[in-house]
Amino acid sequence: MARISVSRRVTKSPLDIAGPWEYKGSAIPDGSIIDLKGKDDLWAPDVHQLGDWYYLHYAVSSFGSQHSAIGVARSKSMDVGTWKDGGTVVTSDPSKPLNAIDPNLIRVNGEFYLNFGSSWQDIFQVHLSNPPVAPSVAIDPYQIGFTSDREVVEGSYLFHYGKYYYLFMSKGKCCGYDKSRPAPGKEYRILACRSSKATEGFVDKDGVDCTKGGGTVVLESHDNVYGPGGQGVYDDTKHGPVLYYHYVDTKIGYADGQKQFGLISQVGGPLCELKWTDVSIKGE
C-alpha cells in the first residue's frame, strides 16, 4: 500500500492503512513541468488506479495566489522514479472566479470528474477526458460548494457510498497556527454535504444547499486535535470507509511542519455522527 503526501513524497505501508509508514522518496523529484511559482513545492496529491495506470493529480501554486494549475502524472507501479509528469489539466488566474488547487478525481459510470478549488468562489467541478488528463470539452467548471461568510472552503473530496455521493470539504484557516491562530471555531474543520448525483444537488444534514453555505461538521478541533482538514476517504477492505486528514497535535506543536496524519474509521469515531446511510436530509 502506498500513500502520496504533500511535497511530492511517497510513503509506503506494507500491511495496513494504519501503518507503520516508511518514507521512500519524492514522486516528482524535479518539480512539475508546469511553469508557475510553486512548481517545486507541489500540493494536495490525489491518486487513483485506472486500468494498468495510476494517475496522480497535484496542485501548483503559491500561498494566496490565484495563478494556479492542476497537473497530472502517471505510473504503472507508484514506485519512486516511475512517475511521468504530463503537465497541465486545469488552470486559473485572476480573470477566472476560481482557484485551481486541491484536485480530487472521481469516476462515475465510466465518466471522469475533477473536483477542486479554494478561495475565489470555493469548490468547482469539471468533466475530464478519458484518460483524465484534460477537460473533455470547452465547458467552464461549475460550482458545487460555496460559502459567503468570508471563510475559505477548499480541499474537496467526493466519495460514493451506498446511494449517495458525499462531498467532504475543509473550511477555515488551514495554516500558520504557530504565528497566528484564528478565533476559536474558525480554524480548519471538515464538513460534508451529500447528493444522489455526483454533479449537483449537494445538501447538508439540515437540507441547506452546499452552494449556499451548507455543510455538516464531521470533524473539528477536540482534545489535543486542532484544525483537522485536508481530508479524503479511503474504502479499506479491512476497516471500511476511513477518513484521513492532517491536523495539529497541540502536545507537539502548531507549526505546519509539525502536522500529523490522522485516521478515523466509520465506526467508533466522529465520522459516525453523520450517520451516512440513514441520515434524514430534507429536500430529497
Image: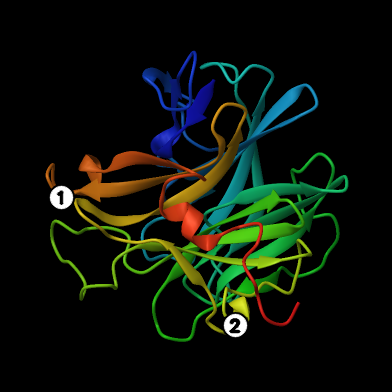
Residue under pointer 2: 208
Residue 266 image label: none
Pointer 1 local density, CA inside 10 Å: few below 14, some 14–19, many at least 20: some
How many badges with numbers are in the image? 2
Residue 133 place in picture, x, y as percent: 74, 43
Label 2 amino acid? Val
| Disc marking residue 250 | 1
Between residues 177 and 14, which one lies in front from this camera angle? 14
Label 2 close to label 1 by CB (< 8 Å): no
Reading the chain from its start, which is encountered first: label 2 or label 1? 2
Q: Is residue 268 left or right of residue 74?
A: left
> For the residue labelled by badge 1, is the local secondary structure a helix, a strand or a loop?
loop
Residue 121 appears in the rendering: yes
Residue 115 found in image quarter: bottom right
Q: Secondary structure at mark 2?
A: loop
**Is residue 282 placed above or below 191 in the rendered structure?**
below
Q: Nearer the viewer, residue 40 or 129?
A: 129
